[in-house]
Image (cartoon, rainbow, N blue to C red):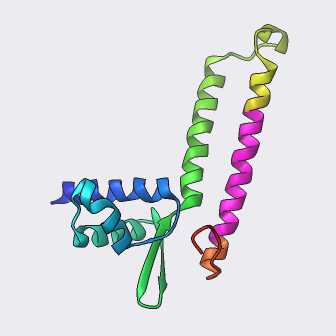
Amino acid sequence: SSGNRLESATLILAYLNEKNRPYSAQDVFCNLQKQHGLGKTAVVKAMELLALEGKIKEKTYGKQKIYFADQVGFLFRECFEFCKKFAECNHLCPSFPQSQFKDVNDADLKAMDHEISALCAEVQSVTQSCRELDAGVDSGPWV
């Protein structure tokens, strides 16, 4: 049924994003079958659908297809959520002179700046890794 397909695809997408490494459909089937009772055909179809929708990446090596998380898209969504929260905070705080915010903690601001810088660096790194994967260059912990 359509509900089961969507549920399988959602489960597989979360799994690939969490593990953040390439898997064949067979690997995903073996890893998720016992706990979630997914059939092999359902796993293959869900992974093909996710790849078609651009939610995961697919590479063919010989006769085997390898699937992996769309890291750039995943990080982009994380950054987008962070920016949305930041915008909400700015919306809630009217524009006052800096002196009005005496209780703003400099350490917290520095920590947020550091987190933003780290996220930007991670996005650049993942973008480069994706370019290398797209070029057919294997890199990463799974080699």
Q: Is residue 17 above or below residue 90?
A: below
Percent position of residue 23, x then y: 44, 70
Residue 34 sits in quarter: bottom left
x and y percentages locating residue 63 in the rendered image: 41, 90
Q: Residue at x 28, y 58 (%)?
A: 8
Given residues 17 and 54, the one toward you in this image is: 17
Residue 123 forms part of the magenta stretch: yes
- Taking the image as shown, residue 15 lies to the left or right of residue 116, namely left
Quarter of the image holding residue 43?
Answer: bottom left
Q: Nearer the viewer, residue 63 or 50?
A: 63
Q: Give the percent coordinates (x, y) of residue 37.
A: 21, 58
Does the magenta portion include 96? no
For residue 33, side relative to residue 125 (left or right): left
Q: Say which quadrant the C terminus sits in.
A: bottom right
Query: Going 57% across and 70% down the picture, which residue do you hit?
Result: 142
* Main SS category, magenta section: helix
Count how many numbered circles sit on residues in the image: 0
The furthest residue to the bottom: 62
Question: In percent of the image, x 40 and y 71: which residue is there?
Answer: 52
**Vertical arrangement, residue 40 with respect to residue 76, above or below:** below
The foreground one among 6 and 95 is: 6
State the residue at coordinates (80%, 29%). 110
Position of the N terminus, as image quadrant, is bottom left
Q: Which stretch did the figure color magenta?
A: 112-130
**Left or right: where 10 falls relative to 1:** right
Left/right of residue 2 with respect to residue 61 in the rendered view: left
User: Residue 71: x, y in percent?
Assistant: 57, 59
